[in-house]
Structures are given as structure tokens and as C-alpha cells.
Amino acid sequence: MEEISPGLENVYIKYTNLTFIDGNKGIMRYRGYDVNELAEKSSFEEVSYLMLFGNIPSLDELNDFKNKISENLALPQYIHDIIKNAPENADALGIMQTALSALSETYVNYQWNEKNDLKLIPKILGNTLSIVSNIYRIKSKLPIKDPVFDKNYATTFLKACFGMVGEERARAMDSALILYMDHEIPASTTAAIVTASSLSDMYSSLTSAIAALRGPLHGGAAESAYKQFEEIGNPDNVESWFNKNILQDKKRLVGFGHRVYRTYDPRLKSFKKYADKLVETENQKKMLEIAKKLEELGVKAFGSKGIYTNTDFYSGLVFNEIGFPLYMFTTLFGLSRISGILSHIIEYVETQERLIRPRAIYKGPGERKYTQIH
Ligand SMILES: CC(C)(COP(=O)(O)OP(=O)(O)OC[C@H]1O[C@@H](n2cnc3c(N)ncnc32)[C@H](O)[C@@H]1OP(=O)(O)O)[C@@H](O)C(=O)NCCC(=O)NCCS
């Protein structure tokens, strides 16, 4: 008797050498390296190289990789136009999705092989930095501008958005890009793998991933968690808000719980550190205090059920402290994920390629007679 697996829970679709997660112990590693150690000491381009090519690069390899990314920051005019012509209230991630999809138009019959893949990776990383920074610029009523590479990916991105950036914010952005880079195969990465399994091109696969990321059950949690803090409004309201909304009305506490983790999400440690470090304005201090009080109540109420704080509880605070508005949070997540998604689709196509084509169990009517209506 056939059975379906709702949500593909406990279905394994690939082997991977990329990300290891132990949900009970709260451990996460990229190719064997602890994610928090990488977030503290490494850089986005170094970890991207590790994920994409298997090893930490030598200094020469790293510089070469950075040069190639920097050569690909200029976007074609038609992508500028897509970003510029988006309606004023367009969703930031929606614009990113459209721009990536438009770039796929030039990859007719993309041939997956090591040579083509290696050539395309720095181009995609350069292009996406430019797409996301220009989405921010357009929404901030700034003119479209191709970024100029400066030091590293995170600094280049922040300078492209804000014109200037302090060391601490650049370090926090770099860490956030690393922490969000990969998380095995959530809905977005799975969507990309499904598309790549038909041997479609990399941009089309990324477009599928971004489309899946856009849903509130996946990419939008950092934004929702931050909105929750805004709704509470004041540290004095935390307890009454929690009792009414979470305990009494049984609403879900956003930024809590995870399909894989039964303890604290390991990435939380780094995000919490930056949330403390970068806090500056009175409003940011207030939001952070609300978050900490709320976390305490959440852990007290749900910890015994294995429901603990996840990354998105604190990452929005960090994005806000770096200087980004709420509507950019999910797009920043999307930018961070590009190298992880590329690593998974390349791993899938190059080592285990098989068209993904599951089955559905038919439950509809039996044979019916068709009668023409005209
Ligand atoms: C992430 C999430 C979807 C994972 O859920 P899941 O593994 O599918 O777990 P379920 O939805 O089956 O929930 C299992 C139980 O835990 C409870 N639970 C899970 N997350 C909860 C939360 N954030 N607040 C309150 N209760 C929660 C459910 O009510 C359910 O309780 P029950 O068994 O008494 O009915 C879920 O924890 C959630 O909705 N979290 C809030 C949104 C969020 O932070 N998303 C970001 C994820 S990284």
C-alpha cells in the first residue's frame, strides 16, 4: 500500500558533504568546521570557497576568487531597468527573484560541467551582491550604481548600500552572511535541487529557491520576529503580551521552535553577540530588552518540549542595528544563501544527478463520460 510523506519529512533525497546538523546537541558544521568559529574568524568569500570547492582556500586562491567576484559586480542595463522599474511597493525579495530569473534568459541549454560551473560561480556572487544592494538603493530613493569592490564581500555590499560602513558593522554583516549561508536542504534549497535535477541552468535553479524562500513559513521569520517585538512595544508589556497571546490564545512564538533542533539553534550564539555589540539607539535598546525578556519566558514555557530560540529571533535585531529596514531582512537572508544553494545543486548534479520526479496517489473520481457543452 503506497503512503505519502507530508512535507517530505524524514525523506532523504541526497548525500551531502556540505552541512552537518545535530539537532539534539545543537551542533552545525560546514564541511567539518564549526559554524560559529567560521563566523567569528573567517569571511563570506572564504567560507563560500570552502562550500563550493571543498577546502579552505590558500591566500592566492582566495585573492583570485575575490578578484573574479569583483570583476562581476556590473549588471547589464536591462537588469538595472528591471530594478528601477519595479513598482514602489514591490516586495524586495520579489525584485531579486525577477532579476535572477531575467539573468537566466541568457543561459539557453546550459551545459553543467566543472569548467562552466567554475566560471559562473563568481559571476553569480558578484551579480547578486549588485542586485540586492541596488534593490536597497532604489527603495531608499538612491540612484542605481554598480558596486566597487572594497576589502571583502560584506564591506563591498554595505558600502554599495550605505556609501560608508564601520568595521564592527562590516564584521557583523560578514558573520551573518556566513551563518545564513547554508542549512542543509530546507524548502528553498530543495526547490533549487528539483529545478537543477532537470539540468536547467543555475540562475533558474536560484530563482526557484528564492520563490520558495519568500513564503512566511520559511524565509520571513526574522521579519515576523522583529514585528512581534514592535507589537509588544515596551519591555514592561512583555509578560502580559506573552500570557495573553502565547499562553492564552495559543499563538506561536515566532523565533522559537525548529523542525531539526530540539535545543538552541547553534547560530543564535553569534547573532546574540552582535545584537549586544551593535546596539546603539534608544529604540534598538528597547527592542533588545524586549527580545531578551521574551526569550526567557519562551524557554521557561516551551524548553521542556524541546522548543527553543532559533536564529531568526535575534538576526532581525542585528540587521536593524547594521542599518537595514524590515523589508530587507528576507532579501539579506536570500543573499547569504546563494553560495550554499549553488554548492548543493552542483553537488547534486555532479555526483548524484537524477531527475526528481516523485509520485502522487490519485484520489479523484473514476472514469467519467465526457459530454460536449456546445
Ligand atoms: C519552525 C516550526 C514551523 C517547526 O515546526 P514543526 O517541527 O513542524 O513542529 P510542529 O508545528 O509540528 O509543532 C510541534 C508542537 O510544538 C509546538 N510549537 C512549535 N513551535 C512553537 C512555537 N514557536 N510557539 C509555540 N508552540 C510551538 C506546536 O504547537 C506543537 O504543539 P502540540 O504538539 O502541543 O500541538 C515551528 O516551530 C514554528 O512555527 N515556529 C515559529 C516560526 C519560526 O520561528 N520559524 C522559523 C523557523 S527557522
Image (spheres, grey):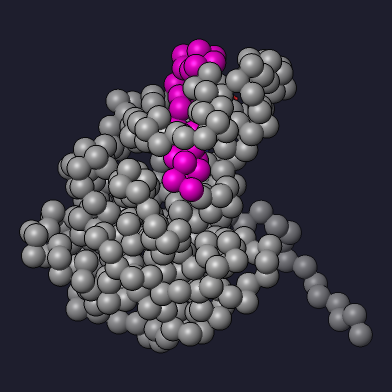
Q: Nearer the viewer, residue 80 or 27?
A: 80
Q: Position of residue 148 (x, y in %)?
A: 33, 71
Q: In the picture provided, is 155 more to the left or to the right than 239?
A: left
Residue 86, quarter of picture: bottom right
Q: Nearer the viewer, residue 89 or 305?
A: 89
Q: Nearer the viewer, residue 73 or 189?
A: 73
Q: In the picture provided, is 122 more to the left or to the right than 133?
A: left
Q: Position of residue 14 (x, y in %)?
A: 31, 54
Q: Is residue 29 visible?
A: no
At a point 72% along the width and 61% down the height, the residue shown is: 366
Q: Nearer the viewer, residue 4 or 61?
A: 61
Q: Position of residue 30 (x, y in %)?
A: 23, 46
At a point 64% along the width and 34% down the height, the residue shown is: 230
Quarter of the displayed picture in which ligand 1 can be seen: top right
Q: Position of residue 61 (x, y in %)?
A: 11, 65
Image position of 297 with respect to 273: above or below: above
Magenta highlight: main SS:
helix
Q: Is residue 327 magenta?
A: no
At a point 37% along the width and 33% down the height, the residue shown is: 277
Image position of 185 with respect to 106: above or below: above
Q: Is residue 297 magenta?
A: yes
At a point 24% along the width and 60% down the height, the residue shown is: 151
Magenta segment boundaries in residue numbering: 295-323
Image mark count? 0
Q: In the picture provided, is 184 more to the left or to the right than 207?
A: left
Image position of 168 with respect to 118: above or below: above
Q: Is residue 87 visible?
A: yes
Q: Quadrant of the C terminus?
A: bottom right
